[in-house]
Image (cartoon, rainbow, N blue to C red):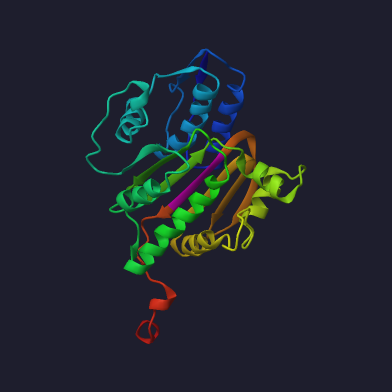
Amino acid sequence: MIHYLPTIKSQKDGFDRLAELAVETKEIFNNVVELDFSRCGFFDANMAAPLAAVLTKLSAERFNRIEIVNIPTAIKNILCKNRFLIPHGYDPVVDANQTALPFIRLQLKDENRFSDYLNKHLNGKGIPRMTRAMGKMFRQSVFEVFQNVVIHSGSELGVFICGQFYPQLQRLDLTIADTGVGIRTNVRRFLRNNKLSSIAALKWALQEGNTTKTGTQPGGVGLKFLKDFIELNGGKIQIASRYGFYEYNRVAEVFSKLAADFTGTAVNLEINTGDTHTYKLSSEISSKDIF
């Protein structure tokens, strides 16, 4: 069976198309599925993470063989540089400009490996200048937000991580996706409300102080920090889960409905690398910085 992949960008439309792919292939079992890129004019390399989530469910849960074919040269090169295509029989390409944050698959228990990934691959990718303390807090906040999305996902197939630095576009995207139950199911279980919509569940989960964690640790700390940073930086945060989509940038905070059911959850953090500010924690600011 042939499925044509259209242009995929780090926008709601890109997540719509991947959700539609998930639904279109939902009933295919024990077959050969060709994913044809001939109609794909552009593919944001970081979107390899949610695409991998869709394809892994298709292969691991429904015993299908995935064949990726007819990839335009430019797209093939970048997806070989970040190693997404390597498990599909393609040869690796050296990332001479070091713009790719490589595609990896981790298990939920591999928290330390994700932290190591951030420490290793965020350096040299155009992140605005930060003090050492600010940089540490930034990485901790990224880790917390991404960890919170997958911690209750129940994703037995693990999580998928990928990123890309786009120097000409002055942006850095870091994306993580899982194949779990999704935010809606998790919040429904916690609130004991089976009628909660995907958008309502997202709104509840993203409200400061709300968390499905047990214990005394507060929720939303990392997200609040990153939203404050994004507002100053001019980047954005996106979350796609089931039928819900969320985007936050300095202009607006938008909740909308996806075109189809994206099983699991994907989070994208986009940083404006054209930002020339130097960031520091408020505790580091002295009177000399103010006057």
Question: Is 208 inside the magenta-drawn segment?
Answer: no
Main secondary structure along the magenta-highlighted residues: strand
Q: Position of residue 289 (x, y in %)?
A: 36, 81
- Using residue 32 as the reference point, say whether residue 286 is left or right of it: left
The x, y position of residue 12, in whole percent, is: 56, 41
Quadrant of the image occupied by residue 281: bottom left
Residue at 61 percent across and 44 percent down: it is: 245
- Asked whether 86 or 125 is in front, the reply is 86
Query: On screen, 289 above or below 215?
Result: below
Q: Residue 195: percent from the left, percent from the top? A: 77, 43
Q: Is residue 284 above or below residue 76?
A: below
> x, y (%) of residue 189?
70, 45
Q: Indicate the quadrant containing the C terminus: top left, top right, bottom left or bottom right.
A: bottom left
Which range is magenta? 265-270
In the displayed structure, does residue 32 sit left or right of residue 125? right
Q: Residue at x 61, y 38 (%)?
A: 181
User: Which is more toward the observer, 10 or 158?
Assistant: 158
